[in-house]
Amino acid sequence: AESAGISDVHDNLLPEEKMKIIQEYAGGENPVCMVGDGVNDALALTAADAGIAMGGIGSDIAIQSADAVLVNDDIKRLPYLFVLMQKVMKIRVNIIASLIINITAVILSAAGILTPITGALWHNCGSVFVVVNAALLLRVKDDE
């Protein structure tokens, strides 16, 4: 912890104590992330804004309680996970674009401008846009 610049360290805690500490931190202005691998981490994983389980060595309950799972248990991949999650959150433009496309299609159909066939094409073009935009996540590489 010292070499990573972490000054506030808690160790040898019971599951309830871990959860209580996470809840105290969660009340602040910054989001709280908990990384754990065992049964005793499940409560804290659910209490955190983001719970990350170490999948390969983790218990089933920790994996089920977490928001994300690192399958290969390499904690060095956490920065990549955070970058990927930030990119995923930016893809919410997909939801907005999809709603706009579908609402426009309903309005144009109600006005008689779109036929059922052109309405279906309009909808499919919107779906293709959403899929292509989401596929941009594949460009995010792990700098491992």
Image: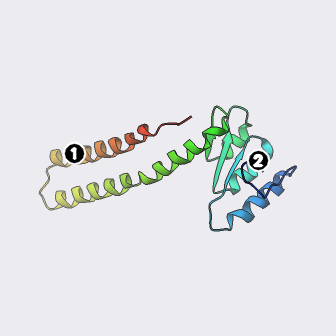
Give the percent coordinates (x, y) of residue 118: 16, 47
Compared across the picture, whether 19 is left or right of 111 comes to right
Instruction: Of the two numbered discs 1 and 2 on the same chain, state the one appearing first in sequence.
Output: 2
Residue 28's label in the rendered image is: none
Residue sitting at x 74%, y 37%: 59
Compared across the picture, whether 52 is left or right of 124 comes to right
Give the percent coordinates (x, y) of residue 62: 72, 42
Residue 120's label in the rendered image is: 1
Can you say whether 75 is above or below 49 in the image?
A: above
Considering the numbered disc 2 on the image, is that residue within a helix, a strand or a loop?
helix
Residue sitting nearer the eye, 12 or 131: 12
Q: Quick one: which residue is furthest to the left in this view?
A: 113
Mark 1 vs mark 2, foreground winner is 2
Do labels 1 and 2 touch, CB within 8 Å?
A: no
Compared across the picture, whether 64 is left or right of 89 comes to right
Residue sitting at x 33%, y 46%: 130
Q: To which residue does mark 2 refer?
A: 41
Q: Quadrant of the C terminus?
A: top right
Q: CA distance from mark 1 to mark 2?
A: 48 Å
Considering the numbered disc 1 on the image, is that residue within a helix, a strand or a loop?
helix
Residue sitting nearer the eye, 30 or 47: 30
Can you say whether 12 is above or below 28 in the image?
A: above
Give the percent coordinates (x, y) of residue 141: 48, 37
Compared across the picture, whether 113 is left or right of 47 comes to left
Q: Amino acid at mark 1?
A: Ala
Q: Amino acid at mark 2?
A: Asp
For label 1, the crowd category at 10 Å Cα-Cα, with few meaning under 14, some 14 to 19 and many 20 or more, is few
Residue sitting nearer the eye, 71 or 144: 144
For label 2, the crowd category at 10 Å Cα-Cα, with few meaning under 14, some 14 to 19 and many 20 or more, is many
Residue sitting at x 67%, y 39%: 75
Q: Dividing the picture into quarters, in which one does residue 25 lie?
A: bottom right
